[in-house]
Image (spheres, helix red, strand yellow):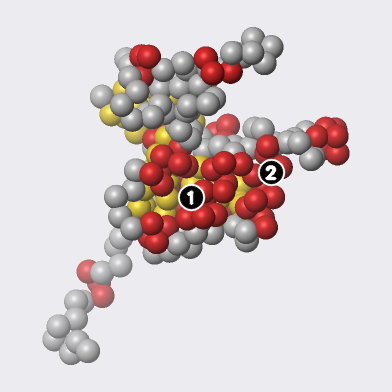
Amino acid sequence: MLNNDMKIDPKYTGNMRKDRLDNDLVCMATAVLWAGRSKDPSSQVGACYVNEEGRIISVGYNGAPNEWPDEEFPWGRDTENGKNLNNTKYPYVIHAEMNGILNYMGQGSDFKNSTVFVTLFPCPECAKFLVQRGIKKVVYLSDKYRLPEDKYEEKFNSDPNIAAKRTLALAGVECVNFADINEKSAEEFKISLRPDEGIEMIKAKDMKRVRRK
């Protein structure tokens, strides 16, 4: 207990910023920034893992396996009517969620009951690894592979997005659209990489433009 002599006069206290960024916004912004590290020309995905205390413990983005030179990696996705799949990125690319787990240098148990912020809803393979690592919440920015309503019944039992959601749901993992916890949607939360301007994050009206040159 502080005695009255040790306390600071109240007229000098309480003058902190009132409009600082909330933690969810910072974590998703981190995922978006790391997505900008990906060399995939068609899909840039980022992931940010946050422990129960709200601290970032790991990040990842989609890319080639270690020791595989990026300039020798098949970044394309055209399969020529289903043929030559092994000449595309799909059999080899490591997704952002997986990289975030594999690159972590601490104990695997540190992920228990953590939250992952991802720019794209996880695929079925990543969903399984999230469950196995003990992640309890997925906050996603985009779900662009979600089945359209007119295809839902027809494709339900063969759609990978449904498989991922089933895996997470049956394992008790909560899935939340970022737009449901923040007023800004995916369209309003973008990162643009232009060599002439550096990294420019365009955000909500409560966040000023940030530049690194």
Residue 114 x/y as whole percent: 46, 58
Q: Is 125 located above or below residue 66 in the figure?
A: below
Q: Residue at x 79, y 40 (%)?
A: 157
What kind of residue is marked 2? Ala
Where is the N terminus found, in terms of image quarters? bottom left
Residue 59 x/y as whole percent: 38, 43
Residue lying at the far left of the rendered structure: 5
**Which one is in front, 89 or 14?**
89
Q: Residue at x 47, y 28 (%)?
A: 93
**Which one is in front, 113 or 187?**
113
Where is the C terminus found, in terms of image quarters? top left
Few, some or many residues within 10 Å of mark 2 (<14, 14–19, 20+): some
Residue 180 x/y as whole percent: 62, 50
Disc 2 secondary structure class: helix
Q: Earlier in the sequence, mark 1 or mark 2?
A: 1
**Which one is in front, 182 or 113?**
113
Q: Residue at x 63, y 37 (%)?
A: 143
What kind of residue is marked 1? Val
Q: Is residue 1 visible?
A: yes
Few, some or many residues within 10 Å of mark 1 (<14, 14–19, 20+): many
Q: Residue at x 14, y 83 (%)?
A: 6
Dot 2 corresponds to which residue?
Answer: 163
The quarter holding residue 170 reads bottom right
Dot 1 corresponds to which residue?
Answer: 116
